[in-house]
Amino acid sequence: MYKAFSFSTIPFAAVHEHPPELIRQAYAGFNARNIPAVLATLHPQVRWSLAWEGDYATGHDEVRAYWQRQWQELDPQVEPTSVRERPDGRLEVAVHQVVKDKQGTLLFEGPVKHVYTLRDGLLQQMDIEQV
């Protein structure tokens, strides 16, 4: 259904500086609703875009609370399709996003860009851009 996720679009230096496993773990954990697995990829002072509500959650506790609220109402799935390093050093992850309500009604399906700032080898900020 989706293009196989490949890290071949990440420049050689970025693969060694920002392990692809970090991105893989974050998305796998999110789709499995495994909050501890995702939090392990996030910097303690993470700023996470609250796409569903607006603004940002700051820190693990706020991010956890946001996801718990979101998952009570929505069933989002995000599948990475490519990753590239931007000139400013941030990682851009192209994803195919499918969002359904809890009754299974499709609310959104399409491409989205997640843009990450890294700090100390962890995801420190996540922003969302429309394609």
Image: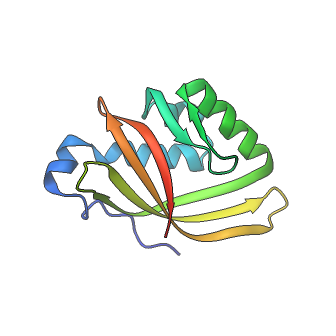
Residue 25, image x, y percentages: 43, 43
Q: Is residue 42 above or below residue 7?
A: above
Q: Residue at x 24, y 58 (%)?
A: 10
Residue 77, image x, y percentages: 61, 58
Return the residue found at the far front.
Answer: 55
Residue 98, image x, y percentages: 63, 65
**Colour scheme:** rainbow
**86 relative to 105 in the view: left or right:** left
Instruction: State how many labels appear.
Output: 0
Q: Between residues 59 and 3, which one lies in front from this camera angle?
A: 59
Q: Is residue 64 above or below residue 11?
A: above
Return the residue found at the far right.
Answer: 103
Q: Between residues 26 and 118, which one lies in front from this camera angle?
A: 118
User: To which quarter of the image does residue 22 belong?
Assistant: top left
Q: Residue at x 40, y 38 (%)?
A: 123
Q: Residue at x 73, y 45 (%)?
A: 71
Residue 35, image x, y percentages: 59, 35
Q: Between residues 21 and 107, which one lies in front from this camera angle?
A: 107
Q: Residue at x 36, y 42 (%)?
A: 117
